[in-house]
Image: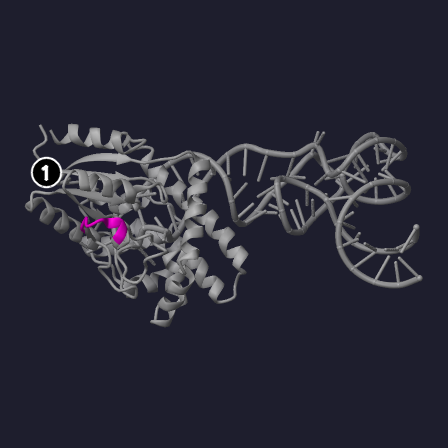
Amino acid sequence: MNKKPKIIVILGPTAAGKTSLSIKLAKELNGEVVSADSRQVYKDMDLGTGKVTEEEAQGIPHHLIDVVEPEEDFNVVQFQELAYDAIDKILNKNKLPFLVGGSPFYLYSIIDGYVFPGVAPKPELREKLQEKPADELYEKLKKLDPERAEELEKNNKRRVIRSIEIAQELGEVPDLENNPRYNCLLLGIKHSREVLKKRIAKRLEKRFDKCMIQEVKDLHKQGVSWEQLEEFGLEYRWIARFLQDKVTKEEMKESLQKDIEQFAKRQMTWFKKDDRIHWVENKQEAEELAKNFLN
RNA sequence: GCCGCGGUAGCUCACUGGUAGAGCAUCUCUCUGAAAAAGAGAAAGUAGUCGGUUCGAUUCCGACCCGCGGCA
């Protein structure tokens, strides 16, 4: 018998319809939403990240949206702390937490309760190591922690650097450890490839109609560099390129559509191997599963 | 009509007289403090068509078809 507090997770690829389902269920089941989205945490990035509007939210409180400035760094661990906090507060009010989003790493940090090694990123170290060739970094890691090196691909500098960062402080990279805090019901929404592509296209069109380009212009005006916008990816990356005259409007739209499709596919590679997920077709199915789970 | 250039993987283009490669796209996968990130692997072509030369042609020659540019 699982005595952990129950929460409901709604996940799926981008443009699947998670927001609308979560609001319907939350209304039905006295819930509040905790967003698990690596971009919605940033203020002033609304259209491009598909944040809920006040109207859509219908009074359902949403957490983990607008928690940092776009210029600030943010990462899973910050997310995890804030999300644990938000979830616990909701539970304390005797309400039902809904963890809703499409950032798999963020989602699973809560679902599986990843225990991170407690070594904070060191930007200067990363910058320094970034300059070095992959071979050299890999050799360095091999000396520090051969076991970890074995698990990594030499060319994946980013991972190799993080492992060096950890191993330098702890002597080695600790084994993975999970400590899930909640009993999660996983509800997934998915569509055929064709349908999803159409949904992505339609949503993009809507976002452009709503002045998404202006949003990116404003971000840059308020001090977010082109490089940062590039890093944010997808709409921010492509609109930034367009605003710098690096691509035409047509190229921007085409590439963006394609990149979002690829993103959706990457999200699905996480989800499709997780057999805890109940794939639901509609609200009724979801509601039934949720009610059974809560009883 | 003439002259030139081109026609090779879905796209853009290499190479070579001994039956073909790259980048991007596609598909699959990895993922524990950058994750809308980072990395790995796989599949894919009767080389425009038809002839000729050759032991052997995608590569050389000819004709034709198609595209682009120039000249009339």
Query: Quick check: A46 left or right of A206?
Result: left
Q: Horizontal placement of B54 versus A2: left or right?
A: right
Percent position of residue A230, x then y: 41, 60
- Disc count in the image? 1
Q: Residues within 10 Å of mark 1 (few under 14, many from 20)?
A: some
| Residue drawn at point x = 16 percent, y = 53 percent | A82
Quadrant showing the N terminus of chain A: top left
Q: Secondary structure at mark 1?
A: loop
The structure's colour scheme is one colour
Question: What residue sits 40% from the left and 46% below the top?
Answer: A263
**Residue A45 horizontal/vertical position (percent):** 32, 60
Closer-to-camera residue (A176/A8)? A8
Determine if the magenta segment contains residue A109.
Answer: no
> Relative to A55, does residue A220 appear above or below in the rendering?
below
In the rendered view, would you say B65 is above or below A238?
above
Q: Residue at x 10, y 43 (%)?
A: A95
Describe residue A145's horizontal placement relative to residue A89 as left or right. right
| Chain letter of the residue carrying label 1 | A
Q: Is residue A60 magenta?
A: yes
* Image quadrant assignment for residue A282: top left
What residue is shown with label 1?
Answer: A5
Quadrant of the rendering where the C terminus of chain A is positioned: top left
Q: Using the image as rendered, state which of residue B7 and residue B71 is in the foreground.
A: B71
Viewer-proximal residue, A147 or A264?
A264
Magenta-colored span: A55-61
Q: Residue A152 at x, y = what percent?
A: 34, 45
Where residue A127 appears, as percent x and y from the top left, is 33, 64
Q: Can residue A239 be spotted in the picture?
A: yes
Q: Can residue A173 be seen in this snapshot?
A: no
Kindly identify the amino acid type of the residue bearing the numbered disc 1: Pro
A83 and A143: which one is in front? A83
